[in-house]
Amino acid sequence: MSESNITITLIGARLAKPGIQFIFRGAAAECEKCKLKNVCLNLDKDKKYQVVGVRNGNDHECFLHDVCVRAVEVTPCPIIVAIESRKAFNGSKIVYEEPACDTACASYSLCHPPGLVSGEKYTISEVLDESPPCDKGLTLKKVELRQ
């Protein structure tokens, strides 16, 4: 993991443990009056992150969290998704477009994982394997995407 991938941010002290993954949902109304909002709100909205380190230092009061917030180091998480096999090549760049599927499809959650944003560019870091069948008849492969 490179240093350039690490971002320092503040999260609730109960969540400040290496390995914890979360999706940053953006600012709440209470954040507007906080003097530390620029540190808390420095992540990309709706993207998935993983805590890779906890910074030693002071805890800070927060209007949202029941305890406090703590400084942590985070990196973007790779996301597992099913895409059409014809697009699944290691190292290739894709623009993720959320497929129009029926929520009853066996592969729905794999084709619509949390943390992916439709229209964003991602890199396929690894092609994993065949996915469950697609109700639309598409041949799918599971891939690992990185931001």
Image (cartoon, grey):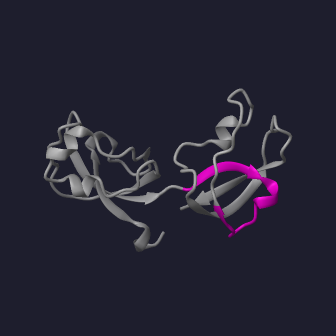
Q: Is residue 133 left or right of residue 80?
A: right
- Residue farthest to the top? 104
Q: Is residue 110 left or right of residue 40?
A: right
Looking at this view, is 5 or 25 the one in front?
Answer: 25
Q: Taking 37 as reference, is 28 above or below it?
A: above
Q: Answer whether residue 68 is visible to the viewer in this image.
A: no
Residue 139 drawn at (x, y percent) = 84, 47
Q: Answer whether residue 57 is visible to the viewer in this image.
A: yes
Q: Residue at x 72, y 67 (%)?
A: 90
Instruction: Give residue 44's quadrant in the image.
Output: bottom left
Q: Residue at x 21, y 44 (%)?
A: 31
Extent of the magenta region = 78-94
Instruction: Give residue 131's quadrant in the image.
Output: top right
Residue 36 magenta:
no
Q: Taking 68 as reference, is 19 above or below it?
A: below
Q: Residue at x 80, y 38 (%)?
A: 134
Q: Residue at x 58, y 62 (%)?
A: 121
Residue 2 drawn at (x, y percent) = 46, 72
Q: Is residue 118 left or right of residue 26?
A: right
